Every structure is written in structure tokens, then in C-alpha cells.
Amino acid sequence: RQRHFTANWVLTLQSVGVSAGILVGMMNMQPSDPLYVPFARALRGRGVGVYTVNSPQVKQAPQGGRWFHVAPLLRTGARLVLSDSDVVWLRDPVPYLRALEAAHPKLDFAVSTDAQGGTDGRRLGDELDVEKWRACGTSMNIGIMLFPGGARAGSLRAMSEATEHLSIDNNLKRVDQGPMNYRWKYGYRDFKWPKPLFAERDSSGQRLCGLVNGSVVGAVLPAAQFCNTLTHDVLRLWNASAVRPFALHATRPRQRGEAPPGPVLDLPRSGSVGGCGSRARRGS
């Protein structure tokens, strides 16, 4: 079943014009696995980088364990879009990611949201800007994350805090989103950040989110353009805002372990990221 999700994920990306820089990480599979070999060969024939992702964390809980393999990709310095395999891409997100980098130089990552509405609809050219900072108070949906290039210290700190938090209190066996949100915004156990979630100002006003005691700057992607099934199909936020959506995350109730997230998409201006195990290297 996961192979169908992954194949569809690749198909939608390539159909909207993303022709290079696609990377798929297949969890809990060996390079010699009879299921992996033909599937990887088929994807590579379409120009997709494929590698196996194995670690004690991934073996224990794929959904949470995947985060232990993100930092090596960030250290390459490439722009990175991290996406669950149940995301359908409707438009090429690369130009938008570059626009966010230019508009918000402080930004360490931007993330989708579980909110059912946007904030003020501020424009960024023909698109919507990130939501106002208060949207960070709603659960940040880590099924879509955008990381600017440059191996930013804040991006790496966010991943370090996430993996450390997933390593304690049995958090790895929980849905990863809740523990990661709490760690970034407020702290852990009885320890609380001296500066919990707050507004980080830039030239756009109070749109960015101060996280991890001010060492990480995040933002929430526009709910009308990085949609879930409710905001896209029912509320149709994109229509009300007169914009075209970039992605539809087909969030729905499901049994744990069904269609676990796995693919990673890297979209640098030039080159791509390939991988061997959990280590990444820049290629061309």
C-alpha cells in the first residue's frame, strides 16, 4: 500500500513541473529487499533519488523515527521541502519557497497547519504570505515543512530539539506532532522555556514565531494554499482567498502504521540531494 502512496506522490510532483531534486526515503527496508529493488529501479528510471532509511528509531516507530534522519539533509545546505506521502502536490512550491526566503530572512522553517482558517490574508506577490504569528498557537502540522537553504543554525536546532524530545517519556511511540509542537513552543516536563512561543518581528510585522527560547524562527504556511481535506474540499479557503492551492494533505483517521510518512523532497536551485542510509550528499 505504501508503494502506491509513494508512486502517487512522485507522479503529482513531476506532473506540476518538479523534474529534478526529488528524493524518496524508504523506511525499514534493506537495499536487497525483493520489494524494494524493483520499486527503487522504477523510480530511479524517472529521475528520482531513492535510498533506504534504517535506524533503531525508525524500526521502533517509523512516524517519529523519520525525524532522526532530517538533520543530515539540512547540513547539505540545500533547500528542503519535507512532505508526507499522502500529500498531493498541485503546484510547484519552489518559487514560493524562494519568495519566503527573500521576504523573511530570519525564517528557519515554515510548516502547514491544522487550523480551519487563515489570519489576515496578507499577500506575497500573487500568493499569500505566511499567517500571522498567532497561528503558531494552533497545532503546526508537520506533514509539510519548508526549510530555507544554507544549513541554518535555527533549522538544525529545531530538529535537534525534536529528536531529543522524541527520545524521552516514550514520546517516540506517540503521534510525533504533539510532542514536537510542545517542545518547540513551551519546553518539556517541568522545564519551560524562559521565552515560550512569542511573536518574532520582521519587516512584515508580527508574522514569524519565536520558538525554542528564541533560538528558532518558524512560520505557518497559508492555510488556504497548503490545505488539508477540510480546508480544500469543504471550506474551500483557496476559493475564498482567490488563490491557487499548492498542496492537499489528505489527512484522515487511520490506523497507526498505515501509509507511514517516508518521502523527502529536496528542491535546491541547482543539484539534488542523494543519500546512502541516513547520510546525505550533494549531487548534480
Image: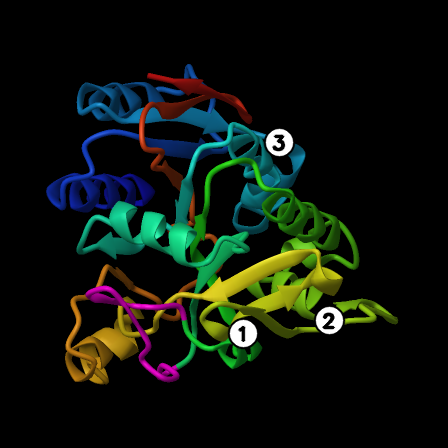
Q: Which residue is mark 3?
A: 55
- Is the N terminus in the top left, top right, bottom left or bottom right quadrant? top left
Helix, strand or loop at label 1? It is helix
3D distance between C-alphas at marks 2 and 3: 28 Å
Mark 1, Cα crowd under 10 Å, few <14 / some 14-19 / many 20+, is many
Give how far across and how far down residue 207 sits, in percent: 49, 73
Viewer-nearest of discs 2 and 3: 2
Q: What residue is at 18 percent from the left and 25 percent from the top?
A: 46
Q: CA gap, disc 2 to disc 1?
A: 12 Å
For label 2, the SS is loop
Q: Position of residue 38 (x, y in %)?
A: 26, 20
Q: Is residue 147 left or right of residue 125?
A: right
Residue topped by disc 1: 136
Which amino acid lies under the numbered mark 3 shown in the image of this protein? Ser
Q: Is residue 112 magenta?
A: no
Q: How is the image coloured?
A: rainbow
Task: Give the dominant element type of the magenta stretch: helix, strand or loop.
Answer: loop
**In the image, is residue 52 above or below residue 231?**
above
Q: Residue at x 24, y 26 (%)?
A: 43
Q: Residue furthest front?
A: 203
- Is there a contact, CB below 8 Å, between mark 2 and mark 1? no
Q: Which residues are magenta?
A: 116-130
